[in-house]
Amino acid sequence: MSIICYDLILMSAPLETAELLAFAQTVDAKSLSRAAAELAVPRATISRRVARLEERLGARLLKRTTRSLVLTDAGEQLYRHARIVLDAVGQAEASVRRTDETVRGDLRVSIMPMINASFNEMVIDFAAQHPELRVSIHSSSQLVDLKRDAYDVAIRASSDLEPGLVVRTLARDPVIVVGAPAYLERHGTPRTRRDLAKHRCIMGLAHGDLPQTHWPAAGGGKVYVEGAFFTNDMLLRVHAAVRGQGLAMLPLIAVRSFLESGALVHVLAGTMQAEARIAVVHPEREFVPPQVRAFVDAVVAWAPGQLDRGLPDAVECARRGKRRRG
């Protein structure tokens, strides 16, 4: 009888925040051990909370294998709602503390690798100004899901920013087609968009893992392109183009110094072109945490006159490319 009563109480009681947090953190970290480390609790505690949550709901949320954790359909549904609940709890807590001018807590930032050296100085100054804040900077050319991957802020260069984000534009930059002089000598210089069919093309990956198949044309529309080299790393695409592996379509900010040094040549001007918006973004929410607001303000203040400097290693890479060709 006591077991039946306990089960009825368990089924009717609301879900605990600690259980939802353990589950969501496990999904974000893709590991019980990493989730435990990030929450600073024993692994057994995380495992017990997730198990209790599954028991309470009467559904399997995670499929555990020797190497990974995979969400079930029920787990996918719960995760989406759990993130909303946990964000609301965080906002409620922050709203009480917002009268305190001290910026504290955690700040996770995703940046594109093409940010120049002055950005590093700005981030270090920002961290020094807020000693009670734990700052984590993740550099990757792969697009992250801010909510799913638990990032607070991101700096992106894209012509298509997803909805649900607060966007502060830092700069606008043309996206152009470039090729190395040695490559153009071997394969010819394309004059029309149809000529792209005869060329090796260096392509990105859409949505992180899907091979890119089209390039944007000036004035709108897209052109099908047969790729020969694919990577989601923008720096690798730049360097592959400098080394003569094919044509690449890249933001001007990433190739400006290569164009100035002669390591790359702009082709199909006025035919193949788009505009990328460099922006600092964060998830839309009713209350923006103080650390997010402070970091966004710092980035916006830093950006003017800085983003047009291009890649920090551009000149040296161009010199190496010339030495190899020589």
Image (cartoon, rainbow, N blue to C red):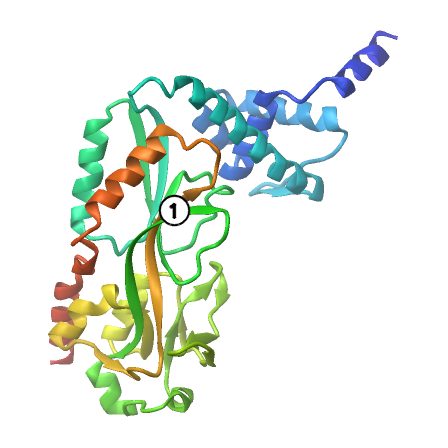
Vertical position of residue 134 compared to residue 142: above or below = above
How far across and how far down the image is residue 275, in percent?
34, 67
Please give left or right for residue 43 compared with residue 5 in the image.
left
Q: Residue at x 68, y 36 (%)?
A: 61
Please give left or right for residue 323 compared with residue 166 in the image.
left
Vertical position of residue 172 compared to residue 187: above or below = above
Q: Amino acid at mark 1?
A: Val
Camera-nearest residue between 152 and 48: 152
Vertical position of residue 92 compared to residue 173: above or below = above
Q: From this viewpoint, is residue 40 visible?
A: no
Q: Quadrant of the C terminus?
A: bottom left
Q: Callout 1: helix, strand or loop?
A: strand
Q: Residue at x 23, y 74 (%)?
A: 242
Q: Residues within 10 Å of mark 1 (few under 14, many from 20)?
A: many
How far across and how far down the image is residue 321, in percent?
16, 73
- Label 1: which residue? 281
How far across and how far down the image is residue 39, in percent?
46, 25
Camera-nearest residue between 126 and 136: 126
How far across and how far down the image is residue 324, in percent?
15, 76
Q: How many marks?
A: 1
Q: Residue at x 27, y 74 (%)?
A: 241
* Residue at far right of view: 1
Answer with the quarter of the image where residue 278 lies.
bottom left
Q: From this viewpoint, is residue 201 visible?
A: yes
Q: Residue at x 26, y 45 (%)?
A: 300
Q: Quadrant of the N terminus?
A: top right
Please give left or right for residue 61 compared with residue 266 in the image.
right
